Image (cartoon, rainbow, N blue to C red):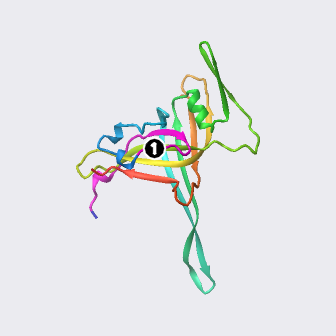
Amino acid sequence: MSVNAANLVLGPARIYYAAFGTSEPADSAVTPTGYLTPPGGSWVDFGGTDGGVTVEIDTTYTPLQVDQIVMDVGARLTELKITVTAGLAEITQTNIQQALNSITSSGSGSGYITMDVQVPSSATQPTYSALIIDGWAPYTSGGNPALRRAIVRKVLSQAKVTLSGDKKTQQKVEATWQAYYVSSSINPLHLVDETT
């Protein structure tokens, strides 16, 4: 098999968030300059990241076995997990609030803003979000850089906010979003690659 270097992918991604159920950009928005164009609308850019953005699809197949055969005779998909991880480098109160699934309250006054982390009851319904990750795909058939857009439609974040204060540790929010089932007609993850 020959190697096609145009299929190798490396480079940073951008990550955007919006409320669960927000209108998504059309697949056709992945255009020859799609990697330069944010999704627009209600989608908000998290800004700079530190350590990259990762989309992970983790499947578990449970083997089928019978006494008469020593080898597994098949398997069934019994678990599917989709996660997105990112280190948010821009430590704004807005980014912290979003990474904490909006369990905060905000205020402001002349020359300042405030944020309080609240303690919800265990029965509180969480605030779901959606994510768009704009990264790189293999080069187009014309040899141009190409966008791969991942739309993760329903997520909650497990965040670790580190507000360190020393001379060599950059502050960041370590966030891992888990995707959740949406409906029988809406898939949790949608990928779009630019091809021309």
Q: Quadrant of residue 133?
A: top left
Q: Residue at x 57, y 40 (%)?
A: 175
- Which of 5/154 is in front? 154
Q: Which residues are drawn in magenta?
A: 2-25
Q: Magenta span: helix, strand or loop, mainly? A: loop
Q: Is residue 8 above or below residue 74?
A: above
Q: Residue at x 55, y 61 (%)?
A: 184
Question: Under tag 1, what secondary structure?
Answer: strand
Number of numbered discs: 1
For disc 1, the marked residue is: 133
Relative side of 67 to 28, left or right = right
Label 1 Cα neighbours within 10 Å, binned few <14 / some 14-19 / many ≥20 = many
Q: Residue at x 40, y 44 (%)?
A: 135
Q: Position of residue 48 (x, y in %)?
A: 46, 32
Q: Residue at x 29, y 43 (%)?
A: 32
| Residue 13 painted magenta | yes
Relative side of 109 to 146, left or right = right
- Which of 65/33 is in front? 33
Q: Position of residue 50 (x, y in %)?
A: 49, 35
Q: Is residue 74 above or below residue 166?
A: below
- The amino acid type of the residue labelled 1 equals Ile
